Image: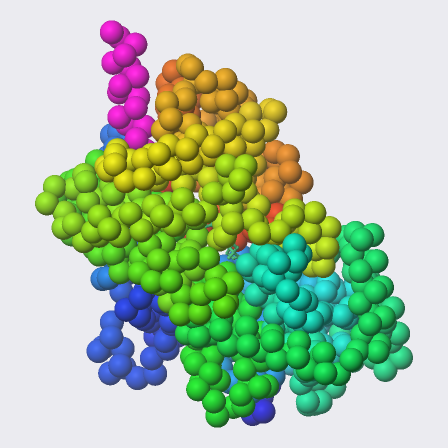
């Protein structure tokens, strides 16, 4: 295991551990991202660093100051002049997609146990990232802004040690002290117990049964796992396999050392079965329900006398499903968690000489991102489509996209959108329990290739906007393909009118009582989300203006039901709860966008009015808005300590969607956002913007460009019109 030999690293991660002028971002034909470290000066000259590379590495771009903006539109234009530097040749905007602090451990443990090495520079910068994200107490939380938990601390401690940090390094010493304060790794949540068991530093006996057997049930059963939320089922498939075969790392010196370092008692004296339901209180977001405890009693008892042929069949079935997923996504897989687990399954079943092993080796890099603070593992292989969709709409709605200066940039956006649309259903379609993909846009790239409702909506809007509103724009996406996208959207409505994320809701919502992952909320089934519902409503509304004939009745029925869902989903105080961005500000912006497209405004709709009044009540003295990620956790509004530019834009956009009749709050928001713009047109990074499963924050650093440009440009016109109306 020399690939993981101990390293000498500085005490602090402040300064890079590698030469940052040598990193380059490579973009595949589909827009997948991989970072490369160049070793010779010749290589560096042949492949110069781009502004985009420099920006994400935190290196200065040295762009000259732009003419000082005298109004909101000029500020938006300056913003886009800067943002254009970060657009790649192929037309999209790469971006760092960090935040969750439980992904590097999966990458590192999964690589270690499958014998896949990292390059030295990757190891060094991952270590630095971990150093830079320790909390005051020496530990790590579940995400970069969260306080320390056993999950974050135990797993990242192991990752750091595998990567080469010695146990007496000051960061390791402090992290260990923090972990021991929590009583060691014993109380790690179930996903942590799983990873530590894979690493052979937690006994499998300390885990509740993970039943791959469920996949042998007939599909019609209402709680069959193919009906679970797509991420959850795709994680529990390889988990079931690896639990079923009790996969564990051989006892290396490091494994033996970790058994001593992670616990406050002798590893060999631990009562493992007693730990199965024990999770430290700092980690508990969704405690086990009584029903789940009951189910565990039954299946743990079964496990004691498991019937070997049944177990073999279950493990075989799990393996088949892993292969289908790998083949559908070229081993990139749905997300970083199941990707690393599938990798272990494939190594175990197919061996180290297999094609699958080689593919998995490469595909790890799609998730590994070098940022200013070191190398991280991203939440997906990027947010390519999501970012380009908003950028396109911002450009067209502000009118900037029609300006000659930006023409080339806009056409490149369209080309990228053209390439990204998924043209076919998956290779393994029904057999892998997938929803149709033909016509959809994914969240990141076509390689990953999963339909997402709102990504399809935003992708469709972006294409329609550019093809319709930019003079002489090439019509790259045919009417047939636009209709395919509409078909996908129409296929995704749930009976109560709402839209979920990737699929229809397939199982009863009470399944949430069986949520075994104590650190996440709402993971067992799909749920309807106001954000997703909005993207679909708005995309369909814009599409039918473009093509009033295609499935007109279906569209009408779908939009009416969806708006009805939105009305019902509004909180009594006025906002909507956001599940993917922070939080009430985010979702309320989307909801009011929907309502605006069906003609509901402050003047004529009690829903829009209540929402505006709520937002106005949250505007701060400086003219901005600021909401903490904690809102998503505790389900009510929590102020952020600082005003946030991105949320200020969301709130101001919401007011404009609702045609809020008083200009002052919007003017003050514009002032705040302009006051934070730098002379080169950019905005500095502020607090984290996104969230998932209620408890994990995730970053969308390009939002600070997309929504600022969009809001400023719109506000410029809106305020003018409003004043004109008032004068008349
Ligand atoms: C995402 C990111 C994008 C997000 C939106 C498109 C914004 C949303 O409107 C629909 C859901 C979706 C696609 C989404 C779902 C969950 C994801 C994939 C993530 C938040 C990014 C990371 C997260 C994934 C589950 C992380 C891995 C963790 C597990 C619990 C498996």
Q: Residue at x 26, y 52 (%)?
A: 481
657 to the left or right of 146: left
Rendered location of residue 539, percent (x, y): 35, 40
35 to the left or right of 528: left
Asked which colour scheme the image uses, the reply is: rainbow
Relative vertical location of residue 189 with respect to residue 199 in this rendering, above or below = above
205 to the left or right of 334: right
Give the camera-side residue of 402 and 551: 551
- Magenta region's main secondary structure? helix
Quadrant of res 71? top left
Relative vertical location of residue 446 with respect to residue 78 in this rendering, above or below = below
Q: Is residue 382 visible?
A: no
Which portion, as a residue range, is magenta? 709-728
The residue lying furthest to the top in this view is: 728
Give the camera-side residue of 668 and 655: 655
Rendered location of residue 388, percent (x, y): 32, 51
Quadrant of res 275? bottom right
Where, quadrant-wise, is the C terminus in this rendering? top left
Rendered location of residue 126, percent (x, y): 52, 72
Q: Is residue 502 visible?
A: yes
Q: How many marks?
A: 0
Where, quadrant-wise, is the N terminus in this rendering? bottom right
The residue lying furthest to the left in this view is: 472
Judge whether residue 710 is colored magenta: yes
Q: Residue at x 26, y 20 (%)?
A: 720
Judge whether residue 271 is colored magenta: no
Q: Residue at x 48, y 53 (%)?
A: 502
Q: Residue at x 22, y 56 (%)?
A: 415
Give the camera-side residue of 655 and 566: 566
Give the camera-side residue of 488 and 602: 488
């Amino acid at each position: 295991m020399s690939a993981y030999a101990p390293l000498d690293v500085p005490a602090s991660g402040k300064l890079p551990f590698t030469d940052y002028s040598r990193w380059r971002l490579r973009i595949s034909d589909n827009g997948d991202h991989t970072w490369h470290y160049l070793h010779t000066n010749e290589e560096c000259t042949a492949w110069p660093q781009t502004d985009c590379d420099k920006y994400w590495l935190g290196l200065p771009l040295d762009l000259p100051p732009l003419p000082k903006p005298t109004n909101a539109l000029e500020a938006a234009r300056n913003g886009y002049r800067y943002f254009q530097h970060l657009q790649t040749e192929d037309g999209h905007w790469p971006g760092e997609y960090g935040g969750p602090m439980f992904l590097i451990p999966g990458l590192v443990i999964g690589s270690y146990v499958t014998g896949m090495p990292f390059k030295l520079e990757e190891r060094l910068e991952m270590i630095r990232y971990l150093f830079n994200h320790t909390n005051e107490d020496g530990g790590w939380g579940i995400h970069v802004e969260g306080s320390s938990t056993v999950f974050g601390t135990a797993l990242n401690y192991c990752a750091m040690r595998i990567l080469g940090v010695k146990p007496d390094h000051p960061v390791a010493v402090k992290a260990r002290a923090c972990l021991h304060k929590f009583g060691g790794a014993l109380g790690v949540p179930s996903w942590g117990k799983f990873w530590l068991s894979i690493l052979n530093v937690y006994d499998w006996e300390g885990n509740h049964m993970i039943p791959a057997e469920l996949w042998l049930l007939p599909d019609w059963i209402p709680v069959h796992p193919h009906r679970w939320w797509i991420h959850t089922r795709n994680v529990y498939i390889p988990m079931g396999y690896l639990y079923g075969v009790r996969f564990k790392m051989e006892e290396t010196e490091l494994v033996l050392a970790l058994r001593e370092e992670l616990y406050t008692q002798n590893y060999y004296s631990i009562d493992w079965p007693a730990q199965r339901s024990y999770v430290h209180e700092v980690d508990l977001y969704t405690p086990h329900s009584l029903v789940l405890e009951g189910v565990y009693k039954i299946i743990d008892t079964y496990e004691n006398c498991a019937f070997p042929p049944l177990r073999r069949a279950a493990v075989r079935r799990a393996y088949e499903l892993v292969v289908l997923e790998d083949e559908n996504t070229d081993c990139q897989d749905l997300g970083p968690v199941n990707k690393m687990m599938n990798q272990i399954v494939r190594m175990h079943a197919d061996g180290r000489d297999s094609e699958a092993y080689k593919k998995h080796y490469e595909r790890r890099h799609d998730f590994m991102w070098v940022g200013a603070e070191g190398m991280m593992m991203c939440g997906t292989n990027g947010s390519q489509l999501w970012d380009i969709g908003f950028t396109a709409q911002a450009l067209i709605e502000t009118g900037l996209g029609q300006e000659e200066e930006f023409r080339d940039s806009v056409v490149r956006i369209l080309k990228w959108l053209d390439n990204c649309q998924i043209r076919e259903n998956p290779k393994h379609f029904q057999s892998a329990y997938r929803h149709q993909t033909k016509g959809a846009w994914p969240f990141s790239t076509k390689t990953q290739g999963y339909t997402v409702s709102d990504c399809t909506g935003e992708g469709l809007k972006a294409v329609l906007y550019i093809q319709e509103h930019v003079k002489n724009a090439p019509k790259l996406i045919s009417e047939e393909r636009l209709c395919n996208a509409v078909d996908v959207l129409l296929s995704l409505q749930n009976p109560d009118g709402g839209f979920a994320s990737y699929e229809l809701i397939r199982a009863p919502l009470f399944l949430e009582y069986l949520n075994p992952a104590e650190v996440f909320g709402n993971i067992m089934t799909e749920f309807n989300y106001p954000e997703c519902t909005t993207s679909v409503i708005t995309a369909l509304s814009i599409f039918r203006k473009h093509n009033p004939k295609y499935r007109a009745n279906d569209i009408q029925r779908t939009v009416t039901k969806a708006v009805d869902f939105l009305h019902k989903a509004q909180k009594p105080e006025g906002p909507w709860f956001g599940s993917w961005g922070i939080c009430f500000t985010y979702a309320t912006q989307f909801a009011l966008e929907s309502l605006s497209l069906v003609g509901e405004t402050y003047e004529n709709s009690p829903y829009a009015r209540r929402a505006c009044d709520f937002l106005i009540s949250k505007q701060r003295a400086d003219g901005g808005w600021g909401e903490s990620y904690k809102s998503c956790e505790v389900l009510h509004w929590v102020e952020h300590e600082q005003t946030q530019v991105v949320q200020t834009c969301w709130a101001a956009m919401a007011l404009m969607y609702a045609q809020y009749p008083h200009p002052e709050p919007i003017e003050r928001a514009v002032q705040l956002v302009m006051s934070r713009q730098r002379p080169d047109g950019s905005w500095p990074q502020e607090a984290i913007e996104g969230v998932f499963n209620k408890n994990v924050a995730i970053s969308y650093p390009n939002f600070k460009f997309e929504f600022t440009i969009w809001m400023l440009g719109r506000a410029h016109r809106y305020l003018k019109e409003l004043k004109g109306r008032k004068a008349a």
